[in-house]
Amino acid sequence: MISLEKHDRMANAIRFLSMDAVEKAKSGHPGLPMGAADIATVLFTRFMKHDPKNPQWADRDRFVLSAGHGSMLLYSLLYLLGYEDITLEEIKNFRQLGSRTAGHPEYGHAAGIETTTGPLGQGFANAVGMAIAERLLNARFGDDLVNHHTYALVGDGCLMEGISQEALALAGHLRLSKLIVLFDDNQISIDGPVSLADSTDQCVRFAASGWATIRVDGHDPDAIAAAIEEARQSDRPTMIAFRTVIGHGAPTRAGTNKAHGSPLGAEEIAATRKALGWEADPFVVPSDILDDWRLAGLRSAKERGAWKTRLAAADPETRGEFERRMRGDLPEALPTAIVEYKKKLAQENSKVATRNASEMALEVINDCVIETIAGSADLTGSNNTKTSQTASVTPDDFTGRYIHYGIREHAMAAAMNGIALHGGLIPYGGTFLTFSDYARPAMRLASLMGIRSIFVMTHDSIGLGEDGPTHQPVEHLAALRAIPNHQVFRPADAVETTECWELALNSRKTPSTMALTRQKLEPVRREFEDDNLCARGAYELAPASDAPEVTIFASGSEVEIAVQAKAMLEERGHPTRVVSVPCFELFEGQPEDYREAILGEAPIRVAIEAGVRQAWDSFIGTDGIFIGMSGFGASAPAPELYKHFDITAEAAVRAVEARLNAGR
Ligand SMILES: Cc1ncc(C[n+]2csc(CCOP(=O)(O)OP(=O)(O)O)c2C)c(N)n1
């Protein structure tokens, strides 16, 4: 048992590491680590199940610092507990180039950072995903192998963000009892008191969505412990509102927004040392305190040993499957299943929408890749994300594989990230492409973190028809292609859709968006090909009859228009080739000679895509012909819209001939 005095000194170690690191970096946020130090100290000395020497232990508790600006809280903890990645040197290099201690915690920089946080509210929704993943895996592998908590530390900012409402409603509905939200209820944000902009009773708000809630003094260690203990016994998720003082201990700045986001300054820090009775120099943790922290770091070693014994005692098949899934390896049977399915498709050659083609491919994939977790933001029948293998997950039954995320695109995407980060599962989830805007901040973080989240975005152009311009994406393909490390797949038919799914599943460090049509498309890949032609991002679908005068590049639903235009141009004596472009990002990664060969030497280059031109100039040049959209769509049947906006083979032929004539 830790005495009150010892607790205070352990918490003060966090406070001084944090304020000294912020001071040295001349930037950062000391207020949160100082205010939440008591909560963190109790959590990590009495409850957290983790092992700094084996930070990837699958059954560890997850701790998410959703209020990512308080990053020094996490870095201090990781250093004090003995995580090797965070040394004292790293703490001294806080916020410097190449350090693991970035301004906000970044996934992959150091073990113990479970997710990237900073955009407020994201971490909370990630934690919901992690808690869902825990329940799903528990339902598959039992308490012996998977049985842990997820803790998320959130601030006023996280709870003001809209994503928090989506996340808490989902968690409350699913009764994620092993999710515990630690609310640093300090009533201060950047502008000043939270009361400037908010008067929500957060406990009442959470309770309304089925959470247990507790209010407690966040500086009283025993009260903190009692609250966490109570939360762990609850049959519902729990939010604990810890009343704290931001910048606790700083004589003039504590309790004010002046403690939030800037160095305290030498004078205030000296006064804080006096006030808290801390005599050690900056970056020095008295050895008895460091020892106590390191001992705390060992608290779960036995538990981990017992877990390892249980894993070793599991039947080999279960163990093998558990380990494979946690490594993130795909089943060995997948490539063959895909090839066999492609053979079948080549025989059928039927006209299908790529959203249906996606469902058909998933029917094959989900049979084989049993770790996929499907879902949709209330558009299941439109996104075609549900297959025969994916029974719905309910609050009472997590054996299913389908999550009804509700109309909550943002939390869906962030929870998917949490599921992917947890490990052992591959999340995919759907909405309309135009509503990727509602999910985009989480999609961007998936890219920044380099994780395997797969976003299924159907109704990918004016081709959706009558729902009109509110629902018709125009700039979205370009906007998603603009995110670094994000693969946007826009397949042209059932074969390409299957190939793109295979690529997305194999892409462990780059998330993918599948842009899929509502409308039916002509098959363009009629011959069986063993190779995954989409893997190079762009490939020649149809060669020219002679030295090409024209190359037409197109993606998705416009590839069939390109094929028609080619036929018409050839008939008029203009040899034309067609290049299908299912994925810009994969094409950019090809060797230069391949890219040059695909771009080709035809004097006229055309691109056809029912979206804005942006980024297509890399294929066609600034003088290329672009057939697509330059404004918003309209409400009408799809075939009429294609004519109205001049996205037709005839339009392409006209533009090419005008160019040819101008050159004569
Ligand atoms: C989405 C988003 N919007 C704005 C910010 C900028 N920001 C960082 S911290 C903060 C205030 C957060 O207040 P609170 O959660 O109460 O943290 P505390 O002041 O207690 O440290 C804001 C607006 C952000 N990081 N993310």
Image: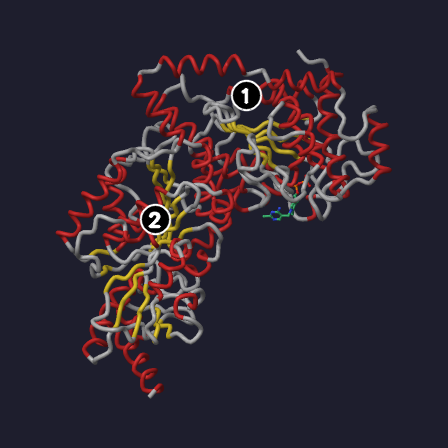
Q: In this view, does 541 lie above or below 427?
A: below
What kind of element bears circle 2?
loop
Vertical position of residue 643 compared to residue 18: above or below: below
Element at label 1: loop
- Residue at horizontal 66%, vertical 29%? 87
What is the crowding at mark 2: few (fewer than 14 residues within 10 Å), some, or many (at least 20)?
some
Residue at 68% in and 16% down: 292
Query: Which quadrant of the frame does ligand 1 lie within?
Result: top right
Q: Where is residue 403 in the image (x, y as percent from the top left)?
A: 36, 38
Which of the 4 image quarters holds residue 293? top right
Give the left or right position of residue 640, taking residue 271 as reference.
Answer: left
For the N terminus, which image quadrant?
A: top right
Pair 1/2: label in front? 1
- The residue pinned by badge 2 equals 379
Which mark sits nearer the N-terminus, 1 or 2?
1
- Please give the label number shown on residue 51: 1
Identify which amino acid the numbered label 2 is placed on: Leu
